[in-house]
């Protein structure tokens, strides 16, 4: 009798544990199923973003602009490398002095934001299409328009050089009497036609364009020269700067500081 009860209890325990295991496995299965379903859904939506509804697209555009104009200076500095007030000033300058006009579909602030975002992060057109929700053609056109307006601002944006005076307090500059600023070159990646490729090819095989920048003591640009092929030697490129129509002017007795690679090129340079 006793034994029989024990056996029955054991059997019941086994049944209960088996039952729990079954339920447990079932739940696990269901969770797994939903997880898979979810990942499939994500994949599908990622695939379909091209066919976003106009409303969604507008929302995404607005949130991109909000990150720049209304989420504070840290957010805008991360995205376009300047704070909100500087951004507004630049937009006004481009409109009033650079002749930038808004289009039927896009305001000046969005144009400038797309332009700045591109140059701040060296971003590709395809990436921008996703970030700004604009077509590749629109982005390319907008960037050209803003760039043309920025170029028109050169009398305002480029500074007149002022020489270092003897009584200057700044520790970094006070030993360089009559120095007008510092210059250096950099290489910008470009795409060229097949015929021009050879001239733009650099030592390591990349295709690039030389650019020369000259700054004053406050790191404000005085002069920029670009367009020389990447294969051109620094010296050749620099010799060209003073003899251009709007070239780099260096009065007698004044000089610029430069990287050692430029040092034997010109009389007006002093290596730092
Ligand atoms: C924005 O940045 C400019 C230039 O760096 C600076 O002069 C200005 O004070 C900044 N404005 C604010 C509100 O932080």
Image (cartoon, rainbow, N blue to C red):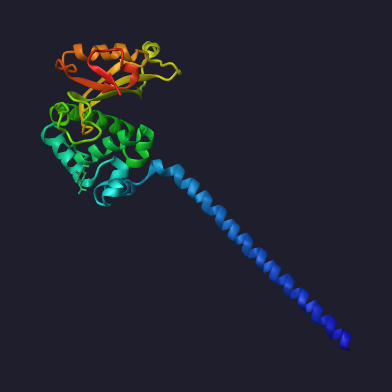
Indicate left or right for 210 with 203 as reference.
left
Tally the marks: 0
Residue drawn 31% across the image and 42% down it: 79
- Report x, y in % for residue 91: 17, 39
Residue drawn 25% across the image and 25% down it: 182
- Report x, y in % for residue 116: 27, 36
**Which quadrant of the figure has residue 185?**
top left
**Which quadrant of the figure has residue 174?**
top left
Residue drawn 16% across the image and 33% down it: 168
Q: In this rendering, does residue 107 appear at all?
A: no
Q: In this rendering, does residue 5 appear at all?
A: yes
Task: Give the position of the N terminus as an image quadrant.
Answer: bottom right
**Which quadrant of the figure has residue 255?**
top left
Judge by depth and name the residue closer to the eye, 235 or 266.
266
- Report x, y in % for residue 166: 15, 29
Task: Give the position of the C terminus as an image quadrant.
Answer: top left
Residue drawn 20% across the image and 42% down it: 86
**237 lies above or below 167:** above
Q: Quadrant of ligand 1?
A: top left
Query: Most extreme residue toward the bottom, as rendered?
Result: 1
Judge by depth and name the residue closer to the eye, 143 or 205.
205
């Amino acid at each position: 009798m006793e034994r029989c009860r024990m056996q029955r209890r054991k059997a019941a325990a086994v049944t209960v544990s088996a039952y729990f295991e079954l339920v447990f496995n079932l739940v696990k299965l269901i969770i797994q199923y939903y997880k898979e379903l979810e990942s499939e859904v994500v994949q599908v939506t990622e695939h379909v973003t091209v066919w976003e509804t106009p409303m969604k697209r507008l929302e995404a555009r607005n949130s991109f602009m909000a990150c720049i104009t209304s989420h504070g200076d840290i957010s805008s500095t991360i995205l376009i490398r300047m704070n909100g007030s500087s951004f507004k000033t630049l937009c006004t300058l481009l409109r009033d002095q650079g002749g930038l006009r808004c289009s039927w579909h896009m305001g000046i602030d969005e144009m400038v934001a797309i332009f700045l975002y591109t140059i701040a992060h060296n971003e590709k057109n395809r990436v921008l299409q996703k970030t700004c929700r604009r077509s590749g053609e629109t982005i390319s056109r907008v960037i050209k328009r803003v760039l043309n307006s920025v170029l028109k601002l050169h009398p305002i944006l480029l500074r007149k050089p002022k020489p270092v005076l003897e009584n200057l307090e700044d520790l970094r500059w006070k030993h360089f009497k009559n120095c007008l600023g510092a210059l250096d070159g950099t290489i910008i990646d470009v795409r060229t036609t097949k015929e021009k490729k050879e001239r733009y090819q650099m030592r390591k095989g990349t295709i690039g364009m030389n650019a020369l920048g000259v700054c004053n003591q406050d790191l404000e640009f005085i002069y920029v020269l670009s367009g020389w092929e990447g294969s051109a030697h620094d010296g050749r490129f620099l010799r060209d700067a003073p003899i251009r129509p709007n070239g780099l002017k260096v009065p007698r007795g004044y000089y610029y500081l430069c990287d050692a690679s430029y040092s034997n090129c010109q009389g007006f340079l002093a290596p730092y």
